[in-house]
Amino acid sequence: MMDIYLKLNEMGIELPKPTAKAGIYKRTVCFADRLVYVSGTGPASDMPTGKLGKELTVEQGMEAARSCALNILANLHDELGNLNRIKRFVKLLVFVASNEDFFDQPQVGNGASSLLCEVFGSDCGVATRSAIGVPVLPGNIPVEIEALLELKDE
């Protein structure tokens, strides 16, 4: 069994600090014994803002989605104490702030999916997914991602 922290280290990835909450909510909620829901999580604060298809390219959107996934991992590490407890990612819901003529939301979502696949492997890291275009996201961020995952038996 692969150690997730060793894999992150091999990839040259250092987890960011957990994200600050922007309201009255929990970043994660554990339920039904082994399931974890992760609230909508944005990219790093130094990422470009704006809409895909207007101010931002698909490649910038993919980088923002990758950053969202890293923030999700940081929040999970903070809440769970150990990312090796993750059995598999079940579902990602990717919101993409999109211009009305932008239709590549699934490609943007690949930024997050490819990172999770590379870190956790295809059996654990590739989840079901929806990628939805929305007119605006909080703080003018380009991407926000929610996640549902299953933990291993303890």
Image (tube, grey):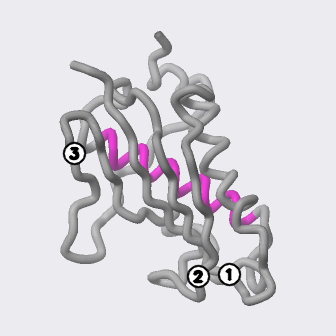
Residue nearest the observer in this picture, 125 or 54: 125
> Residue 1: horizontal and vertical position, in percent?
47, 10
Query: Which residue was labeled with disc 3?
Result: 30
Closer to the chain start, of discs 3 and 2, is 3
> Residue 104: horizontal and vertical position, in percent?
77, 68
Does the stretch in magenta take in 62?
A: yes
Callout 2, which amino acid?
Val
Compared to residue 61, the image places residue 152 above or below, namely above
Residue nearest the observer in this picture, 26 or 87: 87
> Residue 36: horizontal and vertical position, in percent?
30, 45
Q: Left or right of 6: which side holds 97?
A: right
Compared to residue 95, the image places residue 145 above or below, namely above
Callout 3, which amino acid?
Cys
Real-space Cα separation, disc 2 to disc 1, in angstroms: 6 Å
Identify the secondary structure beneath mark 2.
Answer: strand
Closer to the chain start, of discs 1 and 3, is 3
> Which of the numbered marks, if any, corresponds to residue 49?
none
Callouts 2 and 1 close, C-beta under 8 Å? yes
> Which of the numbered marks, if any, corresponds to residue 98?
1
